[in-house]
Amino acid sequence: MRKKKIYTTHDVCQAGYLVLKNHPPELMDRNGKIIFRFILTDSLFKDLSDYNNGAEVKAIHLSFVVKKLESQITATRNKIGIGLWDWD
């Protein structure tokens, strides 16, 4: 069985763009920081390239997805016991 390649980012806007392109993320804790984890496919790679080259997206759609992801970050932090202002 081939091991799946994974792409991770902490950039909520980039993650939001990928969600709009139908790439569901998994949120995970990495040393007290919440990151977005995606299965790296040819489609995801193409969408990352488009994002990095300034792909256009409707601001209202992206802002809605980003707000949803931010609420998921808060829920994940609460679930694992990391407070919003815990910097240590």
Image (tube, rainbow, N blue to C red):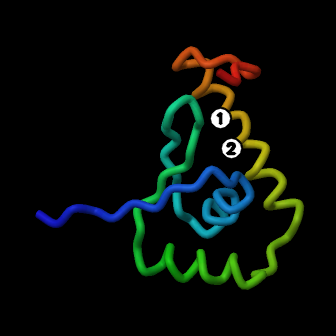
Report x, y in % for residue 74. Answer: 68, 28
Q: Is residue 15 above or below residue 48?
A: above
Contact between marks 2 and 1 (CB within 8 A): the answer is yes
Q: In the depicted view, which residue is nearer to us: 60 or 37?
A: 37
Residue tagged 2: 69
Residue, x 63% and y 26% (percent of image)? 75
Amino acid at pointer 1: Ile
Report x, y in % for residue 69. Answer: 68, 44
Residue, x 51% and y 32% (percent of image)? 31
Quadrant containing the C terminus in the rendered view: top right
* Occupied quadrant, residue 13: bottom right
Query: Counting other residues with Cα less than 10 Å from the Cα at mark 1, is it few (<14), some (14-19), or many (20 or more)?
Result: many
Most distant residue in the front direction = 88
Report x, y in % for residue 73. Answer: 65, 35
Q: Label 2 vs label 1: CA separation?
A: 6 Å
Which circle marks residue 36 in the picture? none
Q: In the depicted view, which residue is nearer to us: 63 or 14?
A: 14
Quadrant containing the N terminus in the rendered view: bottom left
Which circle marks residue 73 in the picture? 1
Report x, y in % for residue 65. Answer: 74, 52
Q: Secondary structure at mark 2?
A: helix
* Occupied quadrant, residue 78: top right
Question: Does residue 60 appear left or right of residue 68 in this picture?
Answer: right
Q: In the depicted view, which residue is nearer to us: 30 or 37?
A: 30
Amino acid at pointer 2: Leu
Residue, x 52% and y 41% (percent of image)? 27
